[in-house]
Image (cartoon, grey):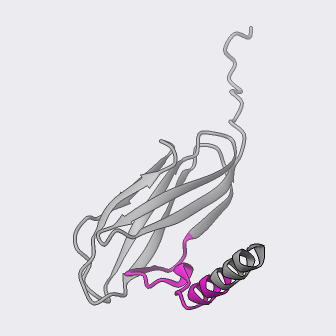
Amino acid sequence: MKIILLTGLLLLATLNTGYMQNQPDQSQAHSVIKFKEVSYNFGNMPYGSDVSHSFAFKNVSKNRICIRDVRTTCGCTTPKFSSDPVKPHRKGAVVAKFDSTRPGHFEKTLTVMVSDGEQIVLTITGDIGPKPQDNGSAGTK
């Protein structure tokens, strides 16, 4: 009885492995938009500097697409994008503006929601310098 059960499990595992090998790799699924880059490193920057980056993309599908929404990991990152339809083979952009009044290293993500249901994650990183010390003469005589 045990031999029959083991043989059945082995046969099931073999069939399942063959099935999985014929499935497309989800990481290579066709995308309707292609970003020029999905991550950007601002490098070292001074505290309080104006920091933003434009993530350019192209509609590589045969249909119009729209950016439905862009969600960020915190309020320190502000996305800017157009919700107007992008025609096939045309370009668009998602701009990420970062509030650089928090010293130290940062890594933030923006999740782009496309009209076909696709979600693309963009990442910004960098290092903000320390807050400048107030060198005023207040309180000294």
Q: Look at 74% across and 77% down and name the residue there.
A: 6
Total count of labels: 0
Viewer-nearest residue: 114 or 82: 114
Viewer-nearest residue: 80 or 109: 109
Viewer-nearest residue: 8 or 99: 8
Task: Determine whether 66 is above or below 15 in the image.
Answer: above
Q: Which portion, as a residue range, is magenta?
A: 13-38
Q: Position of residue 72 (x, y in %)?
A: 47, 51
Q: Check the picture and name the quadrant holding the C terminus.
A: top right
Viewer-nearest residue: 120 or 83: 120
Q: Position of residue 81 (x, y in %)?
A: 34, 62
Q: Position of residue 44 (x, y in %)?
A: 71, 56
Q: Position of residue 91 (x, y in %)?
A: 35, 81
User: Magenta includes 36?
Assistant: yes
Q: Look at 31% across and 72% down and name the residue there.
A: 116
User: Magenta includes 136?
Assistant: no
Left/right placement of residue 101 relative to residue 61 reads right
Task: Determine whether 57 is above or below 54 in the image.
Answer: below
Q: Check the picture and name the quadrant holding the N terminus.
A: bottom right
Task: Determine whether 134 is above or below 112 in the image.
Answer: above
Q: Look at 68% across and 41% down and name the residue there.
A: 103
Left/right placement of residue 9 relative to residue 69 reads right
Task: Determine whether 140 is above or below 1 in the image.
Answer: above
Residue extending farthest front: 1
